[in-house]
Image (cartoon, helix red, strand yellow):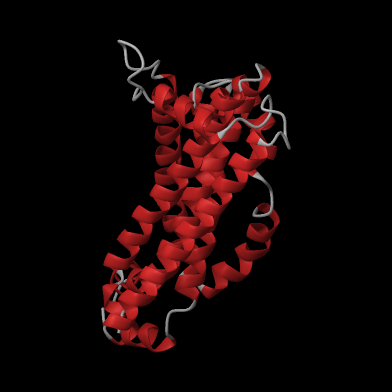
């Protein structure tokens, strides 16, 4: 990376940090000035203290903290990752099977467009009636909701493969599986990775909603219980933690995408 590129990235990071500091300052002013009651809007200090205590990082007592948020975080992240992996697997496999054939794309596309807009949360009652109130139900809904960005991105990636590559594959008498593995996937990889990044965000959202509705242990349930008990600092600590999970997971995927697509960079 040249000097101009490093300077641009540094400027972007400074700008993002300035916006974050401005939002925290506005939050502090609104809470301390009484614009919003502290019953509903705690101070940043109280939220940070609840976050440290919940993650078992507080040094105010012999045990260090209650550690409840840490256990809830592990449960939510586990559901998010498991659902995302299942969604990515099925999305890539089904997307490749559909996208590699123009005829199959024409047949299946209307059905995909009919099912795609359905919100995953709307399927929770159906999933509850089939699976019951258990972790498997939430995992199914998370995987279903997160599968569509990967599936549609894979279909688009395969549909955009150069026709000349298909002609080369026919000349080399490559099988359909060999074409998918050696030509289709590498060319569709940018679309697939972009779909997987979006799917990870959806997996986190659906996991939290599923925990709230199905009363499964996790950050969703912790936030809901804190709201019902008017524990504003615990509520905001859970929300901040969700934001951190989303930020870190997206950053990790962006780094992996950059490494895997180095061949695209000039």
Residue 192 visible in this rendered orientation of the protein: no
Q: In this view, does 237 lie to the left or right of 73?
A: right
Residue 13, position in %: x, y? 41, 63
Q: Position of residue 148 (x, y in %)?
A: 55, 54
| Image quarter of residue 41 | top right
The image shows a total of numbered marks equal to 0
Q: Which residue is drawn at 50% across and 32% down?
A: 45
Q: Residue at x 55, y 67 (%)?
A: 104
Question: Where 10 falls versus 117 (above or below)?
Answer: below
Q: Quadrant of the C terminus?
A: bottom left
User: Please, which residue is most extreme toward the front here?
Assistant: 33
Residue 208 locus on image (x, y percent):
55, 34
Q: Where is residue 154 in the image (x, y as percent from the top left)?
A: 47, 64
Q: Nearer the viewer, residue 8 or 159?
A: 8
Furthest residue toward top: 62
* The N terminus: image quadrant: bottom left
Task: Name above or below for residue 22 compared with residue 84.
Answer: below
Q: Is residue 140 left or right of residue 264?
A: right
Examine the rendered structure and indicate whether residue 168 appears above or below residue 66: below
Residue at 34% over, 12% down: 61
Residue occupying the point 63% across, 42% down? 29
Picture layout, residue 197 above or below residue 242: below
Is 6 displayed left or right of 163 in the figure?
A: left
The reply to whether residue 226 is visible in this rendering is yes
């Amino acid at each position: 990376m040249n000097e101009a590129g490093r300077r641009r990235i540094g400027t972007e990071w400074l700008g993002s940090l300035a916006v974050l500091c401005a939002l925290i300052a506005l939050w502090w002013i609104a809470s301390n000035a009484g614009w919003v009651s502290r019953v509903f809007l705690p101070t940043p200090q109280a939220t940070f203290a609840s976050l440290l205590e919940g993650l078992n990082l507080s040094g105010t007592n012999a045990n260090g903290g209650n550690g409840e948020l840490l256990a809830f975080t592990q449960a939510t992240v586990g559901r998010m990752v498991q659902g995302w992996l299942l969604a990515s697997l099925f999305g890539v496999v089904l997307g490749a099977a559909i996208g590699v054939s123009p005829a199959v794309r024409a047949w299946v596309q209307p059905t995909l467009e009919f099912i795609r807009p359905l919100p995953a949360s709307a399927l929770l009652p159906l999933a509850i009636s089939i699976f019951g109130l258990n972790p498997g139900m939430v995992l199914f809904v998370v995987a279903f909701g997160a599968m569509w960005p990967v599936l549609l991105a894979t279909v688009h990636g395969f549909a955009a493969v150069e026709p000349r590559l298909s002609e080369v594959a026919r000349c080399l008498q490559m099988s359909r599986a060999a074409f998918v593995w050696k030509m289709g996937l590498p060319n569709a990889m940018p679309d697939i990775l972009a779909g997987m990044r979006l799917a990870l965000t959806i997996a986190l959202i659906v996991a939290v909603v599923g925990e709230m509705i199905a009363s499964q242990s996790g950050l969703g349930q912790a936030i809901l219980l804190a709201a019902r008990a008017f524990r504003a600092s615990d509520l905001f600590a859970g929300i901040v933690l969700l934001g951190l999970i989303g930020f870190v997971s997206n950053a990790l995927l962006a780094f992996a995408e950059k490494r895997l697509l180095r061949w695209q960079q000039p």
